[in-house]
Image (cartoon, rainbow, N blue to C red):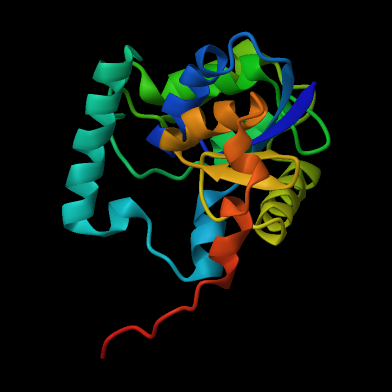
Amino acid sequence: MKQITFYLDFVSPFAYLAFERLPDTLQGLSYSVDYRPVLLAGMLKHHGQLGPAEIAPKREWTYRHVLWHGYSLGVPLQMPAGHPFNPLPHLRLALACGSDGLSNRFFCESVFRHVWRGGEDASDPARLAELQARLQPARDPADAVVKNELKTTTDEAIAAGVFGVPTFGVDGRLFWGLDSLPMLRAYLNGDVWFEQEHWDTVKNLPGTQRPR
């Protein structure tokens, strides 16, 4: 059985789509999944990047693209009333429902669908309170321990080489993005491509300086 770590942030529509498609993608394979909420904004800051929603033309395209993906994949998806939003309450709630920096599929599904189904305000205090009451977390999401746990999981993910979400970690390899799901399945299915040098040779490609 292969152990997969799913790094996710509820602010990401691609993470939501990957979450919904993962069971079908891996059908018939032997695996288990650890669901690890992380703060995407912390990763972007660490790597000196802007998020897609912070670049106006890219923002519009990203939203169109995810709506198309939802339609084409048969995954219900409506843009929340405001995006991007602050996902800290959502991440902390998911962690408060779990332990040791992990949540489980039921809790993550509940938070993802709170955000990405129905087109409502993901950060509305009344809706968040209702969600918390429904999930009945074992810990207080506002507790300092939970807050520190989120920082730790994010820092550990960065140290492991994670730079965005969704990312799937297995056997020390990282698979990033919704479109990596077929590649992930191929690896778990023992595709011979991964026995060759393709994975590691890219590390040795020389970089180029940015034009001035």
Q: Does residue 183 sit above or below 153 in this rendering?
A: above
Task: Name which residue lies at 62% across and 35% down.
Answer: 192
Q: Does residue 180 sit above or below 152 in this rendering?
A: above
How many numbered callouts? 0
Q: Does residue 193 sit above or below 69 in this rendering?
A: below
Quadrant location of residue 210?
bottom left
- Asked whether residue 153 is in view, the answer is yes
Foreground pick, 140 / 21: 21
- The x, y position of residue 186, in whole percent, is 56, 28
- Asked whether residue 126 is in view, the answer is no
- The x, y position of residue 49, in whole percent, is 42, 66
Q: Taking 167 as reference, is 61 left or right?
A: left
The quadrant of the image that shows the C terminus is bottom left
- The x, y position of residue 138, in whole percent, is 79, 22
- The x, y position of residue 203, in whole percent, is 58, 66
The quadrant of the image that shows the N terminus is top right
Task: Name which residue lies at 19% across and 35% down.
Answer: 64
